[in-house]
Amino acid sequence: MDATRRTALGLLATSGLAAATSTRPALAAAPMGMPRDGDWHPLFNGRDLSGWTLFLDGVGDRDRYGAIGIEGDVLHVLGPQYRGPTRAAMGYLATDRVYENYHLSLEYKWGTLRYDPRTLYKRDSGILYHVPPGHEMLWPDCVEYQIMEYHTGDALPINHRAIEAISLGGMPSWPEDFPGNTRYAPQVDAGGNLRQWIHADGTFDTLEGWNTVELIAQGDKAAHIVNGRIVTAIYGLQSQDPADKSRYVPLKGGRILLQIEGAEIMFRNIKIRAL
């Protein structure tokens, strides 16, 4: 671990991790199976999808066509085991609990298979975080940690919003931003939901072999790390107020999702620790 990253992680204050079942409307006070010891704990057990739920748009929560395979501690998404239509349903795997104040780490590697309607597009996936429990939908309210060829680490808040950190000559300010940076990134109406696109400060992903991506989510801020480099930092995270969508309220936690978006991808070493 380089000195810059070690310093950034060392400055994080310890707090706690909250978890709850996906049917609860708010974060639970107790960690429910996630000790606050600061140690790493697996989110994927390498054997089955315990702790995760599946959603495929137009299909539901059953894996009718083998979209997910488990091979030697690896989650294989839309790989050779897939036997469905060429237009593969999009969706995600979601934790059945909600989390706040955590450090998430996983590895991913691209496969070669691509499916309609994305056969001519860059291979695409992502980590969606701070997703509220409740109704499942293809594009839930979230902050997306983009996993895409040469765009890994971008942040895409959907019906959430964030302030992009000041860049220090190519290095996003972290773990604290500069005072006075209070302007939220512009939002675009993308067919019924509001989106921001906060670009990663540098490209550090590889298209061959395994990549390590990390997410630090603490309070109302987050950092995206790609192969050991902080590429994105965001602050002042907020979500739309369900009672009045013209207002925003503080955002500090939610479910964690792994996207299924028409490209073969593998995940392994999915783990989390409390901050």
Image: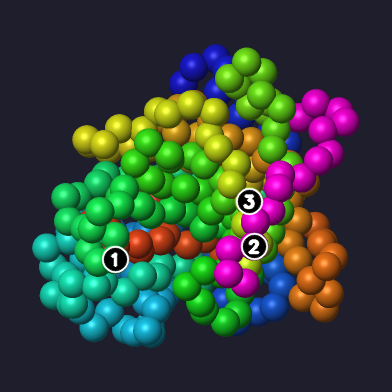
Q: Quadrant of residue 221?
A: top right
Q: Which mark is residue 189?
A: 2
Q: Residue at x 64, y 62 (%)?
A: 189
The residues colored magenta run 175-192
Does residue 143 appear left or right of residue 88 in this picture? right
Q: Against 257, is 211 above or below?
A: above
Residue 55 in sight from this viewpoint: yes
Does residue 115 appear left or right of residue 7 in this picture? left
Task: Please name the residue that numbered disc 3 is placed on.
Answer: 196
Q: Going from the N terminus, do you reach mark 1 or mark 3 first?
A: 1
Q: Does dot 3 land on a helix, a strand or a loop?
A: loop
Q: Residue at x 84, y 39 (%)?
A: 182
Q: Position of residue 74 (x, y in %)?
A: 24, 54
Q: Against 39, is 30 above or below?
A: below
- Disc 3 marks which amino acid? Gln
- Disc 2 marks which amino acid? Asp
Q: Is the residue marked by circle 1 packed among few (<14), some (14-19), or many (20+) residues within 10 Å?
A: some
Does residue 88 appear left or right of residue 270 in this picture? left
Q: Position of residue 43 (x, y in %)?
A: 43, 57
Residue 35, magenta (yes or no)? no
